[in-house]
């Protein structure tokens, strides 16, 4: 790869809260250094809807529905290096708290049993992705190269991690950036 | 059962064990004999009487596989689930039993009469398949025996009234050397050691270069000296008879055929270090041996080889009591064993301090393996130099091997250290051998090109297990069995082992179901590294051994289980949408997911 070529980076939030993306924006003035070295492909920041061939993909959030599966597979197919960013991508996180409930009962509780909605049906529009019965961490659906823990990882941790990736070092987030107490 | 009755039972048990909290585990084992489980009121009463938090008592009950806080039926049948038992057909026999008794594994029958499940290796690999009935072992299971057992259960016959021959083991000693052909009478070795005096006896031990036979191979005399020199007035000798390593059973045979040598070895250790109390920590699976062992102890007391002024030496007072384990492999680790002896959960301690200075109840303690202690008698009888004359440079003496698996004559073989694997295979009548697992699940897997290697601390160390697999066996299945064993036996104290063994077992499950991919082999290698480097004790660091060896020496057996894909989920993706399809009534293309991504663009 020629040294002048900018690396292409894609990011996405699956079953997450966008907190990791907010944290990514928290790298403050490093954003200039970052944009010197990378150009963004599919990302909430570019609003591109499909992902082209990329060097790095950052995935926030776990896998909760069929659309997440398709998007995640697109990222795996297009990105040389795929990173699970944050607690939900790594463990399922908060959304996975529904895993001990029956997804059918959840849907009917939300759409059929709430006051004022007792005559409504569970939406069946084919446009809507169906929820999986359990929320899965992304490494249970595709191969994942690196894991960046945190809820969310701090801007500093994300910056150190991305700097390592860009410089060709195996990413290593130091302990002070990993502990929160 | 009325509350009053339990209060009385608890009180009787407390009296029997002197109301000492360090006997908590022994009390729980004794209390469970009444109804084959420990009802909440029994635990509450016991905790109050011992002034212990109830959570502490419940924690102990929860730790040991053979203690039950919920009813498990009047008869609790546990099939030994080691790979060797499986090779002998244990799974089919378990299915036959379950079918005959109308129940599913892990379930208590509706009338509360019986439950059937599996347990870790019961130490009867040479005469398997084996099972435990309420803790008592039955070997050599076959369809006839299973049918007899079913009938006895249907008749609700008390265990004591079952045919005695069901509970008898074979000794299967096929090769004797110095230890197994020893004909010394009780007291001979002690008389010799007392005659030369304490210091000269320790010098003999040093000259013998005897190393521990439990696996780690620490020099026994160094241990004894450290304990003798530790500043305390009271010292303890412990015999580790918690032989839990899958495929090992040589301690069972020693305790069965040469109990006097073992107890005499303990007394020799007491003579050297100045101990007054000794414990035999007997694994729960060997409950059948207990009555005979108690009788041997009683006879030795009567003969003056235990008790006060042993051999007529004023001040040489020593006695031995038997403590039972309750189905926890990790208690074979010496510090976990000490925790268990103190009536606690068997969590390994952080070392240092070592048991020789801070052992049982903080007292200087020698913990030795059954075989090690028996060997001490040979040293007392014939001298340290004679003992050191056999074996290899770093491994003096002989070694008992527990041979099981695909061979004509499974059983006990005593060879001088330095014997080659091939010599053992020839002796036991093995042919078409694909692999040998030496040292149990935690040991080393040897492929045919390594059969010239020697059993010795310098080369292939072992606590005694020697499992033979012929070329009809799948070494992936062998490793899978061992890894599930470790996941079950992890004590749960440290995260790398508790989580790592489960993840490793889960990844092997995925391969076994045909859903593996090259990425999973990388995952396995990562987990192996993590377990090795980060675990608190040897259980976790040894847990990946069968897989590490397997991937190196029998890789095609693993690759056979891979899909031709970069990665495949372990779960059924389309099945995961089933419930949502059902509730929305959808069945369009978007309501389905392929297990694999569409062909790459």
Image (cartoon, grey):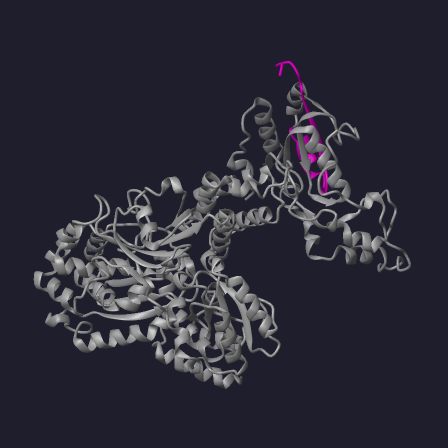
Q: Position of residue A173 (x, y in %)?
A: 54, 33
> Is residue B356 shown left or right of residue A53?
left
Q: Residue A156's image quarter?
A: top right
* Residue A85 visible to the viewer: no
Whether residue B481 is situated above or below residue B595 in the rendered picture: below
Q: Which residue is drawn at the image coordinates 44% and 77% (left, top)?
A: B31
Q: Is residue A10 magenta?
A: yes
Q: Position of residue B455 (x, y in %)?
A: 30, 47
Q: Which residue is drawn at the image coordinates 60% and 79% (left, top)?
A: B111
Q: Position of residue B393 (x, y in %)?
A: 21, 43
Q: Is residue A133 magenta?
A: no
Total of numbered circles in the picture? 0
Whether residue B412 is situated above or below residue B396 in the rendered picture: below
Q: Nearer the viewer, residue B92 or B257?
A: B92
Q: Position of residue A162 (x, y in %)?
A: 61, 28
Whether residue A37 is situated above or below residue B145 in the rendered picture: above
> Is residue B374 shown left or right of residue A20?
left
Look at the image and tell me in which quarter the C terminus of chain B lies: top right
* Residue B213 visible to the viewer: yes
Q: Which residue is drawn at the image coordinates 13% and 58% (left, top)?
A: B382
Q: Which residues are magenta?
A: A1-27
């Amino acid at each position: 790869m020629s040294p002048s070529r900018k690396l292409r980076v894609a990011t996405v939030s699956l079953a997450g809260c966008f907190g990791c993306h907010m944290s990514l924006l928290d790298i403050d003035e490093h954003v200039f250094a970052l944009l010197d070295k990378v150009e963004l492909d599919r990302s909430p920041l570019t609003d591109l809807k499909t992902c082209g061939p990329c060097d790095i993909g950052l995935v926030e959030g776990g896998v909760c529905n069929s659309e997440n599966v398709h998007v995640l597979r697109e990222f795996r197919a297009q990105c040389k290096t795929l990173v699970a960013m944050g607690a939900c991508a790594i463990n399922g996180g908060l959304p996975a708290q529904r895993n001990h409930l029956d997804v059918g009962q959840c849907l009917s509780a939300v759409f059929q049993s709430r006051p004022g909605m007792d005559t409504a049906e569970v939406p069946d529009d084919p446009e809507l992705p169906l929820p999986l019965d359990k929320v899965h961490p992304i490494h249970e659906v595709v191969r994942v190269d690196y894991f960046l823990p945190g809820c969310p990882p701090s801007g500093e941790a994300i910056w150190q991690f991305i700097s390592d990736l860009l410089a060709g070092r195996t990413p290593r987030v130091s302990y002070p950036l990993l502990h929160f107490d | 059962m009325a509350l009053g009755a339990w209060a009385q039972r608890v009180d009787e048990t407390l009296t029997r064990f002197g109301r000492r909290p360090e006997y908590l585990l022994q009390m729980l084992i004794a209390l469970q004999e009444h109804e084959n489980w420990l009802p909440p009121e029994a635990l509450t009463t016991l905790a109050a009487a011992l002034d212990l938090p109830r959570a502490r008592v419940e924690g102990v009950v929860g730790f040991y596989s053979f203690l039950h806080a919920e009813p498990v039926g009047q008869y609790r049948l546990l099939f030994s689930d080691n790979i060797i038992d499986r090779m002998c057909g244990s799974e089919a026999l378990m299915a036959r039993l379950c079918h005959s008794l109308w129940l599913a594994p892990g379930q208590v029958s509706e009338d509360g009469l019986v439950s059937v499940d599996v347990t870790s290796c019961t130490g009867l690999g040479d005469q398997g398949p084996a099972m435990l009935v309420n803790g008592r072992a039955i070997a050599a299971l076959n369809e006839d025996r299973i049918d007899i057992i079913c009938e006895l259960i249907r008749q609700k016959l008390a265990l004591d009234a079952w045919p005695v021959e069901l509970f008898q083991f074979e000794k299967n000693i096929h090769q004797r050397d110095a230890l197994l052909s020893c004909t010394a009478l009780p007291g001979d070795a002690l008389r010799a050691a007392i005659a030369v005096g304490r210091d000269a006896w320790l010098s003999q031990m040093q000259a013998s270069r005897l190393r521990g036979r439990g696996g780690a191979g620490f020099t026994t005399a160094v241990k004894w000296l450290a304990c003798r020199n530790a500043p305390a007035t009271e010292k303890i000798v412990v015999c580790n008879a918690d032989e839990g390593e899958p495929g090992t059973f040589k301690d069972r045979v020693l305790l069965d055929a040469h109990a006097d040598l073992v107890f005499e070895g303990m007394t020799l250790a007491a003579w050297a270090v100045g101990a007054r109390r000794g414990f035999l920590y007997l694994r729960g699976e060997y409950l059948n041996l207990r009555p005979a062992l108690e009788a041997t102890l009683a006879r030795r007391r009567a003969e003056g080889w235990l008790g006060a002024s042993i051999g007529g030496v004023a001040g040489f007072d020593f006695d031995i009591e038997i403590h039972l384990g309750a189905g926890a492999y990790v208690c074979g680790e010496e510090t976990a064993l000490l925790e268990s002896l103190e009536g606690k959960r068997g969590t390994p301690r952080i070392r240092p301090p070592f048991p020789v200075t801070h052992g049982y109840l903080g007292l200087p303690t020698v913990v030795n393996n059954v075989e090690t202690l028996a060997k001490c008698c040979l040293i007392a009888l014939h001298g340290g130099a004679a003992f050191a004359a056999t074996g290899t440079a770093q491994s003096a003496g002989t070694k008992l091997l527990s041979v099981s698996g695909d061979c004509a004559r499974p059983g006990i073989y005593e060879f001088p250290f330095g014997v080659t694997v091939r010599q053992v295979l020839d002796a036991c009548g093995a042919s078409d051998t694909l692999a040998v697992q030496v040292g149990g699940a935690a040991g080393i897997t040897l492929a045919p090109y390594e059969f010239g290697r020697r059993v010795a601390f310098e080369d292939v160390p072992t606590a005694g297990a020697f499992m033979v697999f012929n070329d009809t066996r799948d070494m992936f299945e062998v490793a899978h069995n061992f890894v599930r064993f470790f996941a079950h036996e992890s004590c749960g104290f440290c995260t790398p082992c508790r989580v790592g063994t489960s993840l490793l077992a889960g990844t092997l499950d995925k391969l076994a179901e045909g859903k593996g991919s090259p990425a999973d082999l990388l995952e396995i290698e990562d987990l192996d590294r993590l377990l090795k480097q980060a675990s608190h004790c040897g259980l976790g660091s040894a847990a990946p051994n069968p897989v590490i060896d397997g991937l190196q020496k029998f890789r095609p057996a693993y690759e056979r289980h891979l899909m031709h894909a970069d990665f495949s989920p372990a779960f059924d993706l389309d099945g995961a949408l089933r419930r949502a399809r059902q509730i929305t009534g959808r069945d369009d293309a978007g309501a389905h997911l392929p297990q694999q991504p569409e062909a790459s663009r």
